[in-house]
């Protein structure tokens, strides 16, 4: 999956996290932070330069795409939220959903080796029973016609998350005549 869908989910999470909770971050900063969390599982691609193979435990879609990794990140986010005097449990649960959404969405792609959702208990890689999302080329190959096609698909498929993220709050509260 290209990063478009992950970023849009992060943007929507930023809006959700700011509702009914004070925050020190602007909507743009919050969007960048939550989008970064949504992209965090793909930090494993840096392992390619270090000789980590795709199919290794720490390879692409390996340990960083697991439920355990998402839980670990959520706990860290909850602790940081508590220190910042934010709603720790709520913020941690949103972080869990955002990080886990990355792995779940990647299982719906039509390429790669699947995701190691059950690591550290198993290195088995999983795909969803239905794989409608085209897999994106990795690295510079994303800047190709195929990369543009995948990005366009994701922009359309994840448009509801974008709309939720950017739709003005006043528009939601207006009453129709």
Image: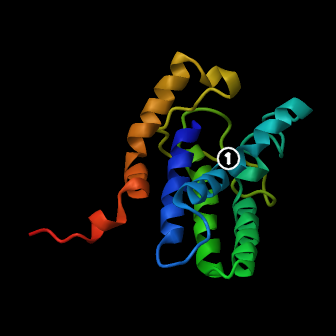
Residue placed most toward the observer, 51 or 19: 19
Residue 55 in view here:
no
| Looking at the image, residue 96 lies above or below residue 56 | below
| Quadrant of the rendering where the N terminus is positioned | top right
Instruction: Name which residue lies at 81% across and 37% down.
Output: 46
Residue 174 in view here:
yes
Instruction: Name which residue lies at 60% across and 21% down.
Output: 143
Residue 75 is left or right of residue 87, and the answer is right
Residue placed most toward the observer, 14 or 24: 24
Residue reaching furthest to the left: 177
Question: Residue 159, position in %: x, y?
Answer: 39, 46
CA neighbours of label 1 inside 10 A, class few (<14), some (14 to 19), many (20+):
many
Residue 174 is left or right of residue 5, and the answer is left
| Looking at the image, residue 75 lies above or below residue 134 | below
Question: Residue 64, position in %: x, y?
Answer: 75, 51
Give the residue at mark 1: 115
Instruction: Name which residue lies at 61% across and 52% down.
Output: 32
| Looking at the image, residue 32 lies above or below residue 93 | above
Task: Assign a secondary structure to mark 1.
Answer: loop
């Amino acid at each position: 999956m290209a990063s478009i869908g992950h970023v849009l989910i992060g943007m929507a999470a930023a809006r959700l996290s700011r509702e009914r909770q004070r925050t020190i971050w602007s909507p743009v900063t919050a969007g960048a932070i939550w989008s970064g969390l949504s992209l965090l599982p793909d930090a494993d691609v840096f392992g390619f330069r270090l000789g980590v193979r795709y199919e290794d435990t720490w390879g692409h879609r390996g340990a960083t795409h697991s439920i355990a990794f998402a839980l670990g990140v959520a706990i860290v986010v909850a602790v940081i939220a508590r220190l910042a005097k934010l709603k720790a449990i709520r913020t941690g649960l949103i972080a869990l959903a955002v990080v886990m959404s990355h792995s779940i969405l990647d299982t719906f792609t039509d390429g790669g080796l699947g995701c190691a959702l059950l690591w550290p208990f198993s290195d088995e890689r999983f795909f969803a029973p239905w794989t409608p999302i085209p897999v994106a080329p990795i690295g510079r190959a994303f800047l190709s016609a195929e990369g543009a096609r995948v990005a366009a698909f994701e922009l359309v498929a994840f448009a509801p998350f974008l709309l939720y993220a950017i739709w003005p709050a006043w528009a939601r509260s207006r009453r129709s005549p």
